[in-house]
Image (cartoon, coloured by chain):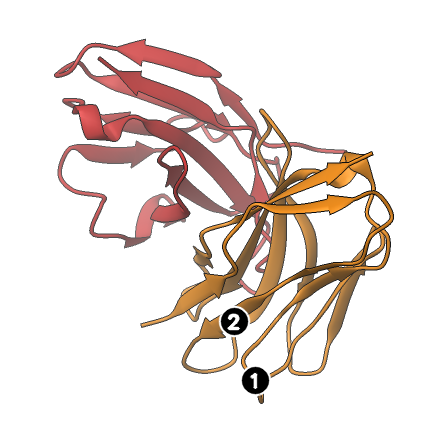
Chain colours: A orange, B red
Amino acid sequence: GNSVTQMEGPVTLSEEAFLTINCTYTATGYPSLFWYVQYPGEGLQLLLKATKADDKGSNKGFEATYRKETTSFHLEKGSVQVSDSAVYFCALSDSSYKLIFGSGTRLLVRP
Amino acid sequence: EPEVTQTPSHQVTQMGQEVILRCVPISNHLYFYWYRQILGQKVEFLVSFYNNEISEKSEIFDDQFSVERPDGSNFTLKIRSTKLEDSAMYFCASTPSAVTDTQYFGPGTRLTVL
């Protein structure tokens, strides 16, 4: 069945460091791919999405490219801030449109 | 900006009791979902709902669970007889159409079963 695998956390970085959070997926067909972010005590917010191969989603300095050949959708940011500390979830939308989430990666950014 | 809202933010209940979690989706949205997140685990799909009926449900969504859209604005999740393992954060989500497929989530209801 469809699934999403994310790198284990927590990821701890200093402010202004480069961020990569790996995400790979298994799916039949051509799912849409998403990154959601969950700040402490809050719900899930859509960070970015990509709907077809080679699409790049971007928002707030974060980027991810839909790579069909490697079935990946890695999240990157060139320079993280303390305010980026949160849990990041990779997800795919399958043919029935429900979201299938990865296990989440906690990011801690230190000043 | 329109938001999905959920009430209550935290519900504490005794095992075996019935609970109803409430959600108000964004007003022009047509597809509704419930997900849950057990503490420290991944977010899991429970059920999707469209045109006043369930579109799909997961194996988690057994006979103890039901959903309803009673009045055209609220979307509720009922657990008839809660178990300890139902303790989780429950998220409601909505989307204007299935094709759009960007789901907008509410802030969640934390359910604690004692």
Q: Mark 2 points at which residue?
A: A24
Foreground of the two, B90 or A26: A26
* Image x and y of residue B44, in percent: 37, 47
Q: Residue A46: x and y, percent?
A: 66, 48
- Work out whether residue B88 can be spotted: yes
Element under label 2? strand
| Residue B28, x across and y down, in percent | 62, 42
Q: Is residue A101 left or right of residue A83?
A: left
Identify the secondary structure beneath mark 1.
loop
B14 is higher (above) or lower (below) than A15? above
Q: In this view, does A110 lie above or below B80?
A: below
Q: Mark 1 points at which residue?
A: A70
Quadrant holding the C terminus of chain B: top left
Question: Dots 2 and 1: beta carbons under 8 Å?
Answer: yes
Residue displayed at 15% across by 15% down: B15
Q: In this view, does A63 lie above or below B24?
A: below
Q: Which disc number belongs to residue A28?
A: none
Q: Which residue is drawn at 37% across and 70% down?
A: A2
| N-terminal-most mark, 2 or 1 | 2
Indicate the chain on which mark 1 is placed: A
- Mark 1 neighbour density, 10 Å: few (under 14) some (14–19) many (20 or more): few
Letter of the chain that mark 2 sits on in the rendering:
A
Q: How crowded is mark 2: few (under 14 residues within 10 Å), some or many (20 or more)?
A: many
Say above or below: B67 vs A101. above
